[in-house]
Amino acid sequence: MIDIKFIRENPDLVRASQKGRGEDPIIVDQVLAADTARRDAIVEFEALRAQQNLLSKSVGAAKGNERLALLEEGKVLSAQVKAADARRSEAEKRMHQFALLLSNVLDPEAPIGGEADFLLLEHVGTPRDFVAEGFEPKDHVELGKLLGAIDTERGAKVSGARFFYLTGVGALLEFALVNYAISSAVKAGLIPVIPPVLVNPPAMEGTGFLGQAAEDIYRLEKDDCYLVGTSEVPLAAFHMDEILDAEKLPLRYAGYSTCFRREAGAYGKDTRGIIRVHQFDKVEMFTFCRPENAGVEHQRILQWEKDFLNAMEIPFRVIDVASGDLGASAARKFDCEAWIPTQGTYREVTSTSNCTEFQARRLNIRMRDGKNTSHVATLNGTAVAVPRMIVAILENHQNADGTVNVPKALQPFLSMTRFELV
């Protein structure tokens, strides 16, 4: 949520941000109109309350018929105050509803445009030349079968399309990736967390996932709760309605959870294999910090993601995501995309977003600095999204016979240097 004072003082900037995202700038005018109505309703209510208080004092000093008349006047005024309070409450609710429709204000440095208009920041590593090595690379589905690591057919039989089993070395590889990610996070000072994967509506709405991303969320209507698509949601809501000690910031967490996504609108995309699935496991990093430190923290999270990919010995590139491809909460986002040999392209495997104070306002998370309180900034970043990292490892480290070399960083967690054929 954007500070209403900021919207009043910078309406054109907020409209431009909406346009940059490909969203409706008219919402800004609706918010401002609702804010004016809210303030008018507050003025009316407070004026009537003041009149009521003066009348109460007059009743105490009056006698006889004058007192009776004042009491009758008080009844009428009481009804007016009650009605004005209801109008004030409704006006505040209406303004809040409009304010929730606004996405975060874009960072001035975020590139403007659609999905393809990202800014390429750097390439790291060089893709292997399989032609020079004398063989054609196999994709992760074929490798998964040869290694007894991935079973999409039984996943579909049991649960439907876009579900899968990890078996044998596939399951061991997940455990190794998660353990490496958590141990690296702990060394970096993050607090490990295993959060709930079912959250209530205030947590989901407060994090910003019930707007443009709502169709991608699994909802349990009978229980009025949601399955999370990322542990960003329960991590963001961890300090909901709390005031944090500014001296203890930043607070950094690394949450491991299963994630659930409908992948609405993704029909026909990545139907083969485990790149785009309904259920997967992930380690997510999350930071609460002072707003003035959010930019530096964003770069720190990005560096952690780059360190992880370097440790996996995978070629990748870093992009500055374009405005039209940002989530509602993100002011700016960087993606790390791993090279996928059989697709001949880079695919997103990690991302990190600076959400400024947007989520904290919605979730009512503040910090106390001396006698003052203000909202914190929140940032998130992927430590490892397991299925896509498995895809990248299998395809980039394969041998001509279908075996796969284990990255050195994972060997201590697996007690093996290569995945053999079954």
Image (cartoon, rainbow, N blue to C red):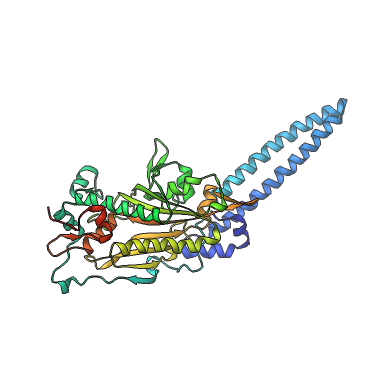
Q: Residue at x 27, y 52 (%)?
A: 176
Residue 153 percent across, percent down from the top left: 18, 49
Q: Which residue is drawn at 80% across and 38% down?
A: 54
Picture layout, residue 81 above or below residue 276: above
Q: Of 193 and 189, which appears nearest the observer? A: 189
Residue 285 percent across, percent down from the top left: 41, 54
Residue 309 percent across, percent down from the top left: 32, 62
The answer to whether 338 appears left or right of 288 in the picture is left
Q: Is residue 54 in view?
A: yes
Q: Quadrant of residue 55?
A: top right
Picture layout, residue 336 above or below residue 197: below
Question: How many numbered circles are shown?
Answer: 0
The answer to whether 250 appears left or right of 171 in the picture is right
The answer to whether 67 appears left or right of 172 in the picture is right
Q: Of 153 and 29, which appears nearest the observer? A: 153
Taking the view exactly as shown, the residue that stands out farthest to the bottom is 132
Q: Residue at x 46, y 51 (%)?
A: 208
Q: Of 32 and 246, which appears nearest the observer? A: 246
Taking the view exactly as shown, the residue that stands out farthest to the top is 64
Q: In which quarter of the image is residue 351?
A: bottom left
Residue 166 percent across, percent down from the top left: 22, 49
Picture layout, residue 120 above or below residue 290: below
The answer to whether 85 appears left or right of 54 in the picture is left
